Image: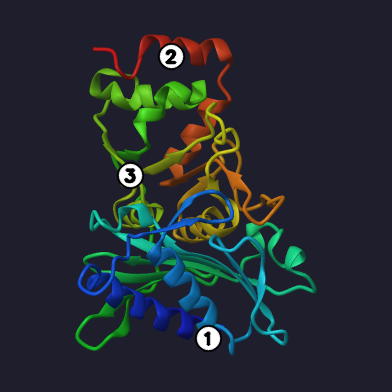
Amino acid sequence: MQAVMARLSEVAAQIALRIARGGIEEDLAGAEGVNSDGDAQKALDVIADDAFRLALADTPVRFYASEEQETVVEVNPAGTLALAIDPLDGSSNINANVSIGTIFAIYPAEATPEASFLRPGTDLLAGGYVIYGPQVALVVTFGDGVLKLVLDPLTASWTLVTRRAQVPLRSNEFAINASNYRHWPAAIRAYIDDCVAGSEGPREQNFNMRWVASLVAETHRILTRGGVFLYPRDDRKGYKEGRLRYLYECAPIAFVITQAGGGATDGEDPILPHVPTHLHARTPFIFGSAEKVARIAAYHDLPDTETSALFGKRGLFRS
């Protein structure tokens, strides 16, 4: 594990430098086609995927599963670990200079790729992310609290700054893409309606809405300031089972957040016990301060008539 983390952190530091120099010698946001799941690829998606895969070849990683690869790559037949990775999360934000990142999950390797990755997130040995922003940070859990390390730009070395990061218990922030309001399930609309109603509504307090469109940036803000992130299923084509990928995104982020005292669900049930049906399986994902995540799950338990009544009374775009 130590060798794997050392190699991940080395490559992350190299990518951070490359991002900082983006546009000087190369166009990191240039189009590179689409990945195996039909999502647009940027040049940096491919660069990061190649860099991590090649760097892990002589480590204990046997199987390498990437959001940018259609199938699992065997990098070291003698390895004992299986690594799933989103090499470059939020790549649509590269040109906007918004924080982007890398998300990774490490499992014990089994006899086959399927057995190694199609398993519950509760089997994770480690999970975390790197955020490439004004501060480059590595956040990781090995199942006993959450560590935060910061990349020192003067020495290109990582320094441990927090041994047990905790999600703040209280916050008045929520993150969701409100443009999809009309497509959400009634329970999600009801929850957001009550937040938007502010001090005059049933929550009796004002809230602020955030949306960065970078999962790593959303996670880092919640780990720092609390709040809740919602990416629910909705009735659009391709979104009925959610949009975020369980293996590369949701499981490792949920591992970090729950180890930091927060909650992570599919909207109703804890997400870590889920078992993905295939490598690129998607899921609804809600995480953040534990009380807020539990409250959203409770909205799903409301009778349809009561949820609909809430929606009718507190429409998001009504004055």
Give the secondary structure at mark 3. loop
Q: Residue furthest right?
A: 111
Label located before the other in sequence (2 or 1) = 1
The spot of residue 264 in percent (x, y) is: 51, 48
Residue topped by disc 2: 310
Spatial CA distance of label 2 from label 3 is: 24 Å
Q: Residues within 10 Å of mark 3 (few under 14, many from 20)?
A: some
Q: Amino acid at mark 2?
A: Leu
Q: Amino acid at mark 3?
A: Arg
Q: Residue at x 54, y 26 (%)?
A: 235
Residue topped by disc 1: 2
Give the secondary structure at mark 1. helix
Q: Is residue 188 above or below residue 35?
A: above
Q: In which quadrant of the rendered image does the N terminus lie?
A: bottom right
Q: Is residue 140 above or below residue 247?
A: below
Q: Is residue 146 visible?
A: no
Which of the two residues, 195 or 189, is positioned nearer the viewer here? 189
Label located before the other in sequence (1 or 3) = 1
Q: Is residue 36 above or below residue 297?
A: below
The spot of residue 184 in percent (x, y) is: 48, 26
Q: Nearer the viewer, mark 2 or mark 3?
A: 2
